[in-house]
Image: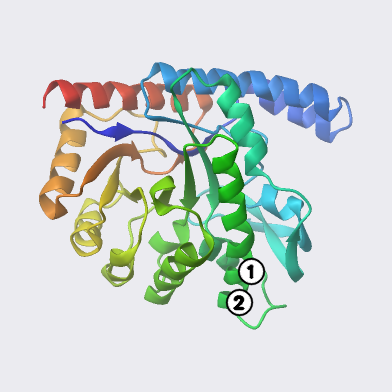
Amino acid sequence: MAVDVFVLGGYSRGIGARKVLREFERGGVGWGEAEAVIGLEEAMLVGVQAGAGLTYVSDPALAWHDLLRPFVEAWRGVAVGGLARFFDNNFFYRVPVFTGKPDPKYYVLAKRAVFLSKIAPRGAGVKVFMPGPVTFAALSDTSVFGGMEEAAREIARILGEEARRALEAGASVVEVAEPLLGDIDARPEHAGLLVDLLSKYFPDPSKLIVSIYYHPPSKEVAKELAVLKAQYLALDYADRPETFREAVKIACPEGLAVGAVDARSIYLEPVERVEKALQTAKELCSPDRLALTTTAPLDLIPQQHAIAKTRHLGHLARRLEEGA
């Protein structure tokens, strides 16, 4: 069974990146020195992904404090607010507080795409990632707007340009992360809004991977995703296999990335369990394209375990191909 293979999102920091960022925040080193140390660690993680044979190498994004912060800091009309829990994880993010219409001072992802293209081995695909507009709006203080939908449209306008510039700068694909759609508070209209925003503001859907992680979407949300256009819709299998099956049967995307490798566990999955997950996906809706991925970004487990998971992901893909 030949499949594409990639991780979702970024990675956790190692000792070097953690130490230099603390020093930078205390004023002990300048950003140039900190960036150099972080860049070396990111190059190592890109090398791990390429060495594992992944279809796309994903941006480790070690300098990012959370999924939203780089964009908040890059935009006028939004400030960094207080701490809030990031879904059901023991991890917190700074709430974006919108004070007006967002306007980019600079773009975030094009620079990342250039950096990754320079350090990735020749022929390796490059994946950058961003928060999706619906999740971004839902996790923010958007009281300045008429409602969440208005905020999401303003956010999508800028994120669509981010995606466009990243692809022009060398990214092969852009991952649009929408964990809200797997959350207990997700509603069908959230998914419908995402489909509309992607079609209106984002570039070629064949260059997009839409990821819904931590939990798969409900049947009601999945129904709205049936018309989503993307290279892959990535869904979490490992956390709730039965909910995954229901969602896949309803959404039945043309490209399905199966999150069979648990990004919140340090233990390695047996080949048989992963093979069952992919076989289940094929039988449910016969997608044109099938991929193996993680259930979520590898930023919630220690870096040495994230590296082990990455290598295991590549090993699993090879075993599946050999057994085809």
* Image location (x, y in percent) of residue 211: 41, 51
Callout 2 touching callout 1 (CB < 8 Å): yes
Q: Amino acid at mark 2?
A: Glu
Query: In whole angstroms, how far apart are the C-alphas of marks 2 and 1?
Result: 6 Å
* Image location (x, y in percent) of residue 132: 52, 57
- Circle 1 — which element? helix
Q: Which mark is residue 150?
A: 2
* Image location (x, y in percent) of residue 67: 59, 48
Up-down: is 263 above or below 23? below
Quadrant holding the C terminus:
top left
Q: Which residue is mark 1?
A: 154
Given residues 256 and 140, the one toward you in this image is 256
* Image location (x, y in percent) of residue 278: 19, 40
Q: Amino acid at mark 1?
A: Glu
Q: Is residue 75 visible?
A: yes
Given residues 150 and 247, the one toward you in this image is 150
**Residue sitting at x 50%, y 57%:** 87
**Residue sitting at x 62%, y 72%:** 151
Given residues 250 and 66, the one toward you in this image is 250
Quadrant holding the N terminus:
top left
